Amino acid sequence: VSSAWPERAIQGVTEAARRPSAPVMRSEAERTLLAYPDLGLPSLRHGIVVFKDVPPGADYPAWAGLAGGYLRSHLLPAAERVVIPCQVHSSRIIDADGPVETMPVGDGVVTGLPLTAIGISVSDCVPLLAVDIDRGVIGLAHCGWRGIAGGVVEEFVERLEVKGAEPAGTVFLIGAAIGPCCYEVGPDLLDCFRPEEVREHSRSAGRGVVFDLKGVVASRLIASGATRGRISVDNTCTSCQKYVLSSYRADGRDCGRMLAFLMLTGSS
Ligand SMILES: [Zn+2]
């Protein structure tokens, strides 16, 4: 079953660099799985799996074990390794191909090795998927407001480049995350961003201000050398779709988690 979800796009918040990419949703092994036609390549496995039954407060070794176990047993049985970092809203990116600690701390992960599965988790924060299929480099980043303000997008692009990816040739997919329809923020948060970003990606709504995190990520990707036409954005809002997806803002600790994953298969 596939469905393009209705969008509650807010007019006026920039749509710059947005090539809308509606996910195909299906149920696999009792969990909802989002897949994106833009990343449907024979030599790549990708998706975002929804774990409604895991509270975001679940501590990291347990959560990473559960998520990694699910990937191995249900979605990526061929995986030789699974690397899921312990996320701390930083800009630190893990290179999955070197010696990796049992529980690496960071908010992004890159690899150039086939059969190395990587994952990052989100519930409202922006999952950023990067694929340079010609050069065999993939990566994932967890982009919440704190991480974005701290430079996680820029660091991520740089680390992809170090692995051999060309930013201009890389496909970036900005996955399902909280949308400007539901992301009301205060002045303290906006103060952490550049004035031009606040101008372009926020707008008054009701008595408050809403902010477009996906738009900020897209702008920062372009400023880092990504090609406008290779950035796709899933406009699905996790808060609007909280019954199916996972929204910390909407449901708090019991919202569950979403795991974005990527793996090169090594075949074409
Ligand atoms: Zn919404």
Image (cartoon, grey):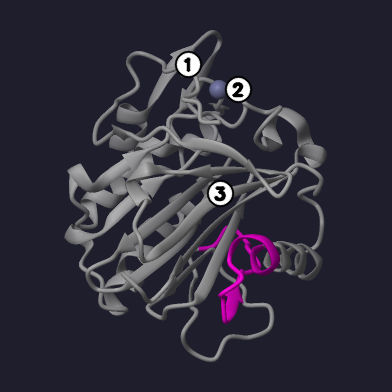
In this view of the protein, which residue sits in the foreground, 153 or 229? 229
Q: Which numbered disc flags the more N-terminal residue, 1 or 3?
A: 1
Marks 2 and 3: which is nearer the front?
A: 3
Q: CA distance from mark 1 to mark 2?
A: 8 Å
Residue beneath the point at 41% across and 38% down: 214
Residue 57 seen in this snapshot? yes
Ligand 1 neighbours mark 3 (CB distance < 8 Å):
no
Residue beneath the point at 56% across and 75% down: 78
Q: What amino acid is found at the position of numbered circle 3 in the picture?
A: Ile
Q: Which residue is mark 1?
A: 8
Ligand 1 neighbours mark 2 (CB distance < 8 Å):
yes
Residue 151 seen in this snapshot? no
Q: Which numbered disc flags the more N-terminal residue, 1 or 2?
A: 1
| 21 in relation to 259, above or below | above
Number of other residues with Cα within 10 Å of mark 3, as a class: few under 14, some 14 to 19, many 20 or more:
many
Direction from residue 67 to residue 203 in the image, left or right: left
Q: Which residues are magenta?
A: 71-90
Residue 107 in percent (x, y) is at 54, 63
| 268 in relation to 245, above or below | below
Q: Are marks 1 and 2 in contact (CB under 8 Å)?
A: yes
Q: Which residue is mark 2?
A: 240
Q: Which residue is mark 3?
A: 48
In this view of the protein, which residue sits in the foreground, 221 or 64? 64
Number of other residues with Cα within 10 Å of mark 1, as a class: few under 14, some 14 to 19, many 20 or more:
some
Q: Secondary structure at mark 3?
A: strand
Ligand 1 neighbours mark 1 (CB distance < 8 Å):
yes
In this view of the protein, which residue sits in the foreground, 108 or 117? 117
Residue beneath the point at 25% across and 59% down: 170
Direction from residue 36 to residue 259 in the image, left or right: right
Q: Quadrant of residue 11?
A: top left
In this view of the protein, which residue sits in the foreground, 117 or 193? 117
Q: Secondary structure at mark 2?
A: loop
